[in-house]
Image (cartoon, coloured by chain):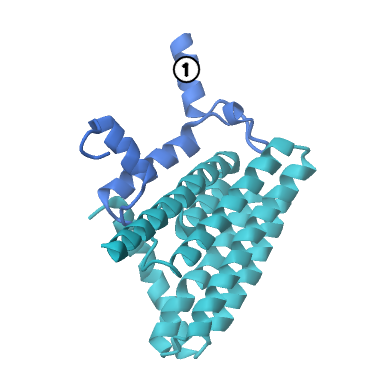
Chain colours: A cyan, B blue
């Protein structure tokens, strides 16, 4: 087993208990999703005030909600097309709010350079989701590139807990550019191959 | 590309055009590389607005210079 696989298994133990509790209490997964974004906005507020450790703690709580909503939906038999759509849309609001919190902080500090770095990281983080969604309307699957949402969220937490948010913004920015490029390349190749097969 | 590329070029291409799943050894290597960058790079090198200091690399370089 890999190190990241082991960490994932350990984290799943308490999450299983929370999922079971939510199922027992019949809490609708769409409500869990919405509560998640509200808590993420609180985390963004803490980031904007420069209270990174507090933001990290709030992010952990918010992302428990983000993580369990889908699992609760499956266990309650409440999986729906709207639920999937709602989750994706709300996730974008959560992502963007965290970036906006940081942009506010850096602008208050008069650091235009990091305002730009964070804004670019935000742009490519959103484009990571958009390119996949758009590609999968044209090809079967577009799951390439490293910097997806779970990686982004964990990096945000690491940056917040260890006060290394600047380095984290560089990593998210650069790897999100690569991820968007990967998805464009894959979609181009797949569509080109489909066209060739159609001609033959 | 894959037929003519040298090993370093292939490694670089595979790191850029990422197709590995989570919980693979390649994923672990990427995670370690990212964490090393985040934690070891001196905040001063990145002109971090919220953190300061040399960090472990800066400390090591200072020790070596002494």
B63 or A120, nearer to the observer: A120
Residue at (78, 38) in percent of width and height: A110
Quarter of the image where one finds residue A57: bottom right
What percent of the width, then of the height, locates residue B15?
Answer: 35, 42
Question: Does any portion of residue A50 appear in the rendered image?
Answer: no
Residue at (39, 86) in percent of width and height: A75
Q: Chain of mark 1?
A: B
The residue carrying mark 1 is: B61
Say what secondary structure mark 1 lies in.
Answer: helix
Q: Is residue A136 above or below residue A111?
A: below
Q: Is residue B16 above or below residue A70?
A: above
Q: Is residue A19 above or below residue A189?
A: below
What percent of the width, then of the height, locates residue B53?
Answer: 60, 27
What percent of the width, then of the height, locates residue A120?
Answer: 62, 46
A83 or A54, nearer to the observer: A83
Whether residue A27 sits left or right of residue B2 in the image: it is: right
Q: Check the picture and name the quadrant holding the C terminus of chain A.
A: bottom left
Whether residue A71 sits left or right of residue A109 in the image: it is: left
Give the farthest residue toward the top. B66
Give the farthest residue toward the left. B3
Whether residue A69 sits left or right of residue A199 in the image: it is: right
Q: Residues within 10 Å of mark 1 (few under 14, many from 20)?
A: few
Question: Does any portion of residue B27 appear in the rendered image?
Answer: yes
Q: Check the picture and name the quadrant holding the N terminus of chain A.
A: bottom left
What percent of the width, then of the height, locates residue A131?
Answer: 50, 59
Give the number of callouts.
Answer: 1
A16 or A170, nearer to the observer: A170
B20 or A107, nearer to the observer: B20
């Amino acid at each position: 087993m890999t190190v990241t696989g082991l960490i994932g298994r350990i984290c799943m133990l308490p999450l299983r208990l929370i999922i079971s509790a939510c199922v027992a209490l019949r809490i609708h997964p769409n409500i869990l999703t919405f509560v998640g974004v509200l808590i993420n906005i609180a985390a963004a507020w803490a980031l904007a005030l420069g209270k990174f450790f507090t933001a990290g703690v709030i992010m952990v709580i918010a992302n428990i909600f983000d993580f369990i909503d889908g699992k609760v939906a499956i266990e309650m038999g409440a999986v729906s097309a709207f639920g999937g759509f709602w989750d994706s849309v709300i996730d974008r609001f959560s992502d963007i709010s965290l970036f906006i919190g940081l942009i506010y902080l850096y602008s208050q500090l008069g650091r235009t350079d990091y305002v730009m770095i964070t804004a670019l990281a935000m742009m490519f983080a959103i484009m990571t989701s958009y390119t996949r969604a758009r590609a999968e309307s044209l090809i079967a699957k577009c799951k390439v590139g490293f910097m997806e949402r779970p990686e982004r969220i964990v990096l945000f937490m690491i940056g917040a807990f260890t006060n290394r948010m600047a380095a984290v913004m560089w990593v998210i920015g650069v790897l999100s550019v690569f991820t968007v490029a990967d998805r464009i390349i894959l979609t181009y190749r797949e569509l080109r191959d489909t066209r060739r097969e159609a001609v033959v | 590309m894959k037929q003519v590329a040298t090993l370093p070029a292939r490694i670089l291409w595979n790191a850029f055009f990422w197709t590995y799943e989570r919980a693979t050894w390649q994923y672990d290597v990427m995670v370690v590389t990212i964490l090393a960058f985040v934690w070891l790079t001196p905040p001063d090198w990145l002109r971090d607005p919220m953190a300061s200091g040399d960090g472990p690399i800066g400390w090591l370089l200072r020790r070596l210079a002494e």
